[in-house]
Amino acid sequence: MSEYPENPGPLPAEKLCNKYNNPNPIKGEGALGNENTGKMYHEGTDRKSLVETLQKMLRDLKKYDIGSSGPNNDGVDGTFGNSTENAVKQFQEEHKDWDSNALKVDGLVGPETADALNREMVGRWYDHYHTPVELVDGVPYHTVTSEFLKEGLKILPEEAKRSKVFLVGLIPSIEVTCTVRVLGFDLEPVKEGTICEIDVDGYVQKTTTNKDGIATFNASDQTKCCHVKWELPVDGEGKLAVEREIILEPAEKEDKKYRLSNLGHQQAELSDQVRSYQREMDRDQTGDESHIAAEVRAWHDGGPKPLKGGNITDNENSGSVSTNSIEGDIIANQGSPSGTTTVGPVIRVEPYVENRKEAPHDGYLHDKTGSIVKMDILRGSHTAVRLINAAGLNIRSNNPDNAVPMDPAVWIDPGSSSSPRTIFFYGRRIPKRGDISALQHCTQFEVMINGHPQRCILVVCVLRYPNDIALIELMGNSLVLNAHDVPHPYHFPEQINIPKGRDPSTIINDVLARMQAKGWATLDHLIINAHGSIDGNTLEGKIHVGGVLTNSHFNQSIQSLDLWNRLSGKVKYIWSMACFSGQDQYLYSQIASRTGAWVTGPAMATQPGRRKVLQNNQIEYAESFAYNHWDGEYLRSHAGSNLPQETDLFFYKARRTTTQSNLGNSLYFNVVTKIPHP
């Protein structure tokens, strides 16, 4: 009998029947389902252990993404969440029940799905599985390996005519020899003697590569794919464990997708695969498969690595070849003398989740494995991604002085030796180009080997705000001043509702009193939600905290400006949402220099109606409002200057510290999402 890894055994399919209105003759304890959406129906005390068994099955099947949570970062955490549900649905789409009926694709693990999973684990976890007779009207269903069958399957005489036996695993008489060429991140074959573990239908074979980086293994002529594990040296000390699935096809097959998939270009659409390959090879990104068909076939099936650059089309550079090659991937062919599969490492990119929320983004594009290949973010966003299989690699932004700068204040890579690995970064307007009207600017995250970029693992596009307006979330302690005549107040835990005509001096006293009551030595954010105005001739602005039809406002008068001295060193950010008043550069620069705070004011009319969609601790921000930003610390050291700072610098300095590997505790504020039209 085969030796199998330690495992919990099959799921108790009969226990996962519906407790109520169950069509089967037994009453179960309910199906396993997504706990986040209220679909966990199992009422047994063993729920967590059953979910762990389910997740281990999906993990060991090696084609389903269940995330990287849990103590071993393999997705096994005992919690049935969205990733587990998606993996279950994918399994259901691909498998049938004991009578060859399609499984219902609902993400629930009831008796049919549990039984299908149990049968799929034969040859991986155990040699024999017997479907519970309660589920199949007493018909004995046996799923066995060929090895187990050789030893003999015991069936009672009275069951012989009704029994059904399903065979899985390799049958020695139809084994074929396959070869695989294994690559590193530099797209060159690995060193001779590299150990590879190749899992074929649950049977793991250990083999080593020859001088050409080629390993030999056995498979059935019915095997369509297998999994390969190997280790690669990385910059510095240590090695990186790499695992890839490869597609096994005859060398003569003209399939246009599988070779690109083996080479690491796993997008769902062929045209996207082609563009990915062309981008990697420094070619024009036409998306036309005919431009690369001969070259890809030659390289994948064992030929030399193509040269980068240029635009090879049709049969150029095809040559006469006998081996397949793939950057970061494997190419394998079944026993054909002229066919070898090539494979190399692939880095998986996942969303970074903090406090059950994904890091800010405006959309992802995933390949068919679920890995993020393109990420859109809004200008001014500080965000992050998690990288799997990237420990020890040198990763950079390919335009570090532009859209995604690698300045250590905003590009934070707290653990290049860890896996999963999280990189925090920031998206901004591209400076020194005068091109701030562009819809987007893109950068690539690249793997560097010996000082040269070898592979693009992620494209980040920095976008203008859709509909011109975005949400800013304020972190830390905040206090809102709501003037009585502003129709849409903000939603913050601490607010002061200003009555009509209340004078500015008393309002400052109110702020200091609230800070004292809360025990705040400093206030991170003071939000002034009031009407504003500007004199068209003198450009003198007013912030009407006491109401438009009163004389209660902040202005340029020395009496009004002196009031701000009482908040000196006590406030980090002052957000004035008073329309037009931001045109008064003297007023706002004086408020900033006297308090030492960053002060923001709009030079145009704001749109308070948009505030209906705001959540707690959020304010709106729009480029069309022409917000200006004054840095109080800068103005204190540059006496006489009234000019605001660049908007990019304002967002750039939102990071409070670079010593914490997170977003929430290391930022004063962040651009988190766009606002739809009301």
Image: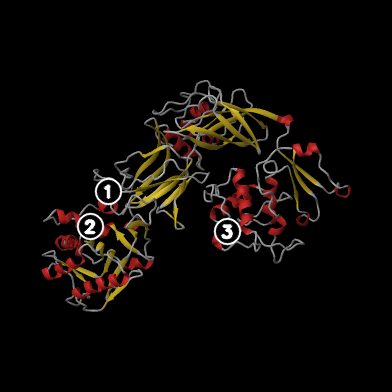
Q: Quadrant of the C terminus?
A: bottom left
Label 1 secondary element: loop
Q: Quadrant of the N terminus?
A: top right
Residue 587 against residue 419 in the figure, above or below:
below
What is the x, y in percent for residue 536? Answer: 14, 65
Q: Which residue is mark 3?
A: 34
Q: Nearer the viewer, mark 1 or mark 3?
A: 3
Mark 3 residue type: Asn
Left or right, 532 with reference to 11: left
Q: Which residue is mark 2?
A: 629
Mark 2 residue type: His
What is the x, y in percent for residue 42? Answer: 64, 62
Label 2 secondary element: strand
Label 3 secondary element: loop
Q: Which residue is mark 1?
A: 436
- CB atoms at circles 1 and 2 under 8 Å apart? no
Name which of mark 1 and mark 2 comes first in the sequence.
1
Residue farthest along the bottom direction in this orientation: 500
How many numbered marks appear? 3
Residue 511 against residue 224 in the figure, above or below:
below
Name which of mark 1 and mark 3 comes first in the sequence.
3
Task: Please indicate, yes or no, whether residue 455 appears anywhere in the rendered image.
Answer: yes
